[in-house]
Amino acid sequence: MKRALALMGVVLVLGAVGMAQCCPPPPPPKEPPCYTTFWVGEGVYFKVDQFWSIFCCCCCGPQDLVVGWRIEAFTGGVVYTVTLPAPADLGTEFLWKGTDALGNPVAPGFYKIVVSLSSGKTVETHVKLVAQTSGCCNPCLPISIPCLTPLCGPYIKVWRAPCTTPCVTPCGCCLPFLFFLGCCCGG
């Protein structure tokens, strides 16, 4: 009886080891769980904000400061880095022009904005850059999947850079309910 139990234990252990070796790790995700969409070449404005809640004390203790930020490709690797000469307050606006460290436009895809704080913590969010098919500053971006805002703690708020080119050609867009959204910038 003892031999049978011992043999069964050995079989179970070897089976578990064999399963661990034969099963490949799950593939990495193809996209982040939430993101905001922008056109390639369009500036991405962002700032670190904090939601003040009556349910938790977000304002206690020393205030975090922004010491730098970086842009990472979703597949890995740092694309762009900024180290601030002096720490900046939360709420300070920053602009990523959609370029790499050499000033070249980045390819369409997912990118992660990572902001470093004086406490040593980082705050991050994802953006998706999409190539435009028309030459105009189209206000109709493909769909974003919004991230939840934490009730207590810093988060990154992102928004589009304003289009400064005068409107030349009306080219709004058709939404599912065929609603025309004004003219767009460019020619």
Image: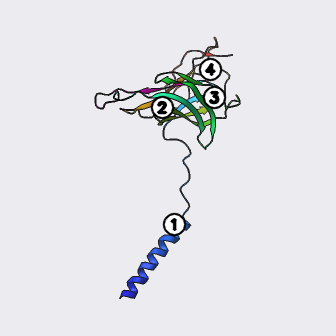
The residue that disc 2 covers is: 118
Q: Is residue 45 above or below residue 33?
A: above
The quarter of the image holding the N terminus is: bottom left
**Residue 44 in view of the camera:** no
- Amino acid on which disc 3 is placed: Gly
In front: label 1 or label 4: 1
In the rendered structure, are the residues bearing label 1 and label 4 in contact, judged by CB atoms less than 8 Å apart? Answer: no
Task: Label 4, secondary structure: give it.
Answer: loop
Task: Label 2, secondary structure: give it.
Answer: loop
10 Å neighbourhood of mark 4: few (<14), some, or many (≥20)?
many
Q: Earlier in the sequence, mark 4 or mark 3?
A: 3
10 Å neighbourhood of mark 2: few (<14), some, or many (≥20)?
some
Q: Residue at x 52, y 71 (%)?
A: 18
The residue that disc 1 covers is: 20
**Residue 109 in view of the camera:** yes
Q: Earlier in the sequence, mark 1 or mark 4?
A: 1
Q: Which residues are magenta?
A: 44-58
